Amino acid sequence: MSIWELLLAFVVVLLMLVALLANVLVLVCFLYSADIRKQVPGLFILNLTFCNLLMAVSSMPLTLAGIIYKGQPGGDEVCHAVGFLETFLTTNSMLSMAALSIDRWIAVVFPLSYHSKMRYRDAALILSYTWLHSASFPIVAASLSWVGFHHLYASCTLYNKRPEDRTQFVIFTGVFHALSFLLSLVVLCFTYLKVLKVARFHCKRIDVITMQTLVLLVDIHPSVRERCLEEQRRRRQRATKKISTFIGTFILCFAPYVITRLVELSSVVHINSHWGIISKCLAYSKAVSDPFVYSLLRHQYKKTWKDMINRILKRSSINSSALEPHGRSVPQLSE
């Protein structure tokens, strides 16, 4: 193995381990906290978490084996099954992110009617559509034998071995990425930009009230005034940072892989095999970033896993104190 291949194998192992740990922690928080389970977005996060976990235990290990052995790991049946699952999980995770953005859009833009517009039944219907949408493409690909081991990505994925099917495969690939990556990106941009617009409007209203209050409070200490102004600046940046993170991670992780898949269809451009695996690793990195972007760094999830850690530490301290020897001398009262 070359240094490049060793480095890529190490990256895949690292992505696999972090994705497993982070997504399992999200799942444990979901099971531990009744408040999280009550929220409708929890269904979308749960679906996204399961997609990421399955990706970490199915596609990533085979990509690692493909890098090490420089060929297809296992038999054709295993590769076809993993390729089918990889296509399904990637599409499902993209649509789950789009569903989360729709949920945020309704909650921010239509706050008074949110509970009537986004109920558990509505979320279940959206998830049913994402599953049907995600399953349709791998079913078609599997029926036409367009799933197999692709040496460029060292992965079991969409792959056409028959030259006579090239035109049909090009059309299928273009439609697939348009109705998965592009559709999800359009939904993300539309909904989150609407959310950002509303957030900025509310920030302006709060800023006006704050400035009026500061003008009226003539005797206010300069340090308090400075803290208020600093909070204004942070408030303006907070929503922009969050929305930039949602859209930015989606583009950064998926766009290189999707563009590479589309460019690959052209026989004119030669793609380096190392870049193919790097673009695949970037797509895998979404399974690592999702738990932090959508769950673990949010206040409710942080509170939940901190409560779990505190409970474990308290229990361990109680057990250790119970195991301490009881032969200590008892201090006597002074006469």
Image (spheres, grey):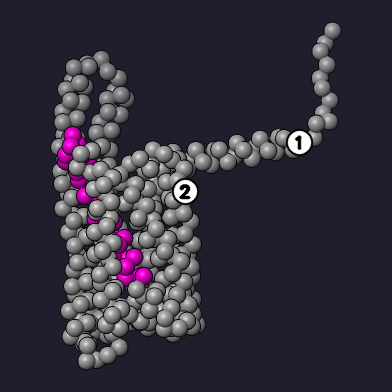
Badge 2: residue crowd in 10 Å (few <14, some 14–19, many ≥20): some
Determine the secondary structure under disc 1.
Answer: loop
Above or below, comparing residue 152 to residue 223 in the picture:
below
Q: Earlier in the sequence, mark 2 or mark 1?
A: 2
| Quadrant that contains the C terminus | top right
Task: Indicate the position of residue 114 as horizontal and vertical percent values.
Answer: 21, 39
The kind of residue tagged 2 is Val
Residue situated in front as seen by the camera: 178 or 335: 178
Q: Does the image show residue 165?
A: yes
* Badge number at residue 17: none
- Residue named by callout 2: 28
> Looking at the picture, how far across and down is residue 328, in whole percent?
82, 28
Q: Which residues are magenta?
A: 85-114
Residue type (three-letter) at the residue carrying disc 1: Glu
Crowding near pointer 1: few (<14 within 10 Å), some, many (20+)?
few
| Residue name at image x 22 percent, y 60 percent | 184
